Each structure stands twice: as C-alpha cells, then as structure tokens.
Image: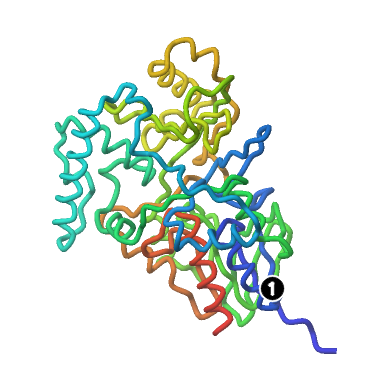
Amino acid sequence: MPSQPLPFVVIGAGAAGIAAARHLHDAGRRVLLLEASDRIGGRARSLRHGDATLDLGCGWLHSARRNPWTDIARARGFTIATDTARWGEQWRDLGYPPAEQQAFAAARDRWEERARAASAGPDRPLSAFVAADDPWRPMLDAISGFANGAPLDEVSLHDWLAYEDAATDDNWSVREGYGTLIAGHAQGVDVRLSTPVTRIDHRGRTLRVETSAGTIEASAAIVAVPTTILAEGRLIFDPPLPAKRDAAAALPLGVADKVFLSVDRVDWPANAHLIGDPHRGRTASYRLSPLGFPMIEAFFGGDTAAMLEEDGAAAAFAIDELAALLGSDWRQRMRPVAATRWRHESWIGGSYSHARIGQAAARDVLAAPVDGRLFFAGEACHGHDFSTAHGAYETGVASARALLDG
C-alpha cells in the first residue's frame, strides 16, 4: 500500500492558524494544527459569566461589512449587533462637556490633517503632528494606546495610514463572543494543544518540526505565531531566517487590556460609553452594559495598560475613574469579574502589532514565503488590516491557498 502523504503543519491556533488549517482541512488535505498553550483562539478568547459572554481579547468585527468573520458568524447562527460602537459619545457628558468634546474633535482633525499632508514624505512618528504642549495631546495619546497599543511617538505614520485608509466605520460585535466564533471555526480540525514548536529544520525536502512532544515530519508548514515568538528566537529555523526575526522585531506587539466589572443594576442604555478623564493620557475607555449585560467593560491601552499590570491594579483604577464620574456610591456597586494581562501570556506576549518608525515594509518581509514550503500568517503579516482578527484570517487563508497552489 502507498504510504500516507506527510501532513501540512500549521503552527499557532490563533485566528490566522485556525483559518489556514480550516481551509486546508476543507480542501481534503491532512493537516495538524499545533498550539503551544492549552486552548485555541490566541488573542481571541471569550469567557462566560452568568448570561454574559465577555471577550477578553478581540471583541469587534472591525470593517464588518467586508470582514470574513461576519459571514462566518451569520452562517453559524451567531447574533451580530450593528449599533454598539459608541466611542465618540460621552454618556450624559459626564466629566466631558460638549464644548470640550467639540474642541477635542477639532484638535484631532488638525492632527490628522497634518499627518496626511506628510504622507508622501519620509516616515515619522505620529507624535510629530501634534505639539507637546497641545492641551489635547494626552487624549490623542490615550486613543493611540487604545488603537495601536502604543503611544503616538512609537507608531509609524506610514503604517497607521495603511490601516486608516482601508478601514471602514462599521464596527459590530458578536453577542455569543468573537472568541467563541473564532475557536469554533476549528471544529473537526486535528488540533494538538500544549505542543509548542521550538525548531523547524528546513534543510531537506522534508520539514522536521520539533515540538515538546517529539519531531513531526511535514511536507510544508504555515507559521502563525505572534511576532514576539519570532523576535525573541523562541522558534528557531535551521538554516536561520534572520530577515524574519528582524521583521518580527520591527513589528512589536503593543499592549491593550480589559477589566470587566459586574454592576448591581443598570442606570444607562445598553452600550453607552464613557472616557474616564479626557485630560489625561492615562485613562480608560468604558463600555457600559455591553450588549445589555449588567457589566462594564474597561479598556486600557499603551502606557496605561503597561502601568496597571499588577494584580488588581487595573480594576482599582477603573473603579476610581468610574466613581469619580458616576458618584462615590458606585464603589460598592461594582465588582471585578475578569482582567487580562496579554503581555504576560507566555506564548503571546502582547495585544497587536504596530510598526516601528520606518519599518512599515517589515510586514511584507514577514509575510513572504520561504522555498515554497514555509509560509507565514498572522495579523502582523497583513499590509493594512493588521491588529485585527479579520486581517489574521485573510493571511491564514492566503497562506493555505498559496501552499495548495504550489
């Protein structure tokens, strides 16, 4: 009898790896999806709390009308909410009167106009387009932390423009959880958990994939791990691939974390929004009663998230900010339920990628296949939809298609 063909191996069971493995599996190919941790989903993770589903990682179907996860969600009977992103609103104008909201909007427009006017020139940090003494600089930095996981002075203009020019304003959410949706997409695929890959020997015709459970021979592999893993040399290639390591180092993961607080009763409409303090860079964004659940979702980014990584610090910070806005009696009405520390997830190491100044082209370098047998996927590999689950999906499917066409 003829021997069974060697499998395709996909390394990393986040959104990109799941998408790649699903595509190969549905094409009738033998595929192994290897995951270092004890769960699938990567930076997509949903948690049940009573009747609520909490998305600890990615929670928004960004650019939803062209987001492939939207159609997958609908096909699987998930509930999509289309009117829940109210980041530009301040419930009851608490701590942020309309005149100040208008002043900030004008400052943000001026900053973006200056940035776009410089798009044809050399790459620069986003901070170059706002004066250090601008009274709205702290708020701009806070928003950069939410969007990029890093402050303005660490984010590439050219990289930021690539995302902004492609993104649309339709940001929807999944009632049953974005993480639930992504993890469920792996149903039926051969997944091996707690199986970190430490080395890929690609010297011969057959790839030798060294894992904690032994060596697997494969005909080709798709590497879909966070940039931290490649930049830190935790996955070794033989022969070495220094361009990949350098590209990954040029695309670090910023940090964005969440805290979920339960509340005893709801005094606001579903999906109301608050900024904790619009005059400070170190503040959080609050989604009140997401999807109608009696919860508050606090979102921290960049320096604020990094400052609050000690156990309990982020929850205490959120309660302080919210009590200042809602009234001191609210301190007794909020209870911490869950908190994330994505930078300390051992096989992840952060939230989503941004390019260092002058390094936007590193995304193409990271995504380029090697010898038609090693392919690379993940949000950091996408030219304009980086930092998103749909960008990860698209790179995973593109790698799978390229492998099949090779």
197 left or right of 117?
A: right
Give residue 73's position: percent from left, percent from top.
59, 57
Give residue 47's position: percent from left, percent from top.
64, 39
Taking the image as drawn, is residue 29 in sight? yes
Q: Residue at x 63, y 49 (%)?
A: 180
Q: Residue at x 34, y 58 (%)?
A: 163
46 left or right of 246?
A: right
Query: Is 45 in front, or is 323?
Result: 323
Badge 1 element: strand
Q: Residue furthest bottom?
A: 1
Give residue 20's position: percent from left, percent from top.
59, 68
Specify how the rendered protein is coloured: rainbow
* Quarter of the image where one finds residue 12: bottom right
121 left or right of 176?
A: left
Residue to which mark 1 is pinned: 217
Q: Amino acid at mark 1?
A: Glu
Q: Quadrant of the C terminus?
A: bottom right
User: Considering only vertical position in the picture, is 146 above or below 382?
Assistant: above
Give residue 122's position: percent from left, percent from top.
17, 60
Q: Residue at x 43, y 16 (%)?
A: 323
User: Considering only vertical position in the picture, is 383 above or below 203?
Assistant: above
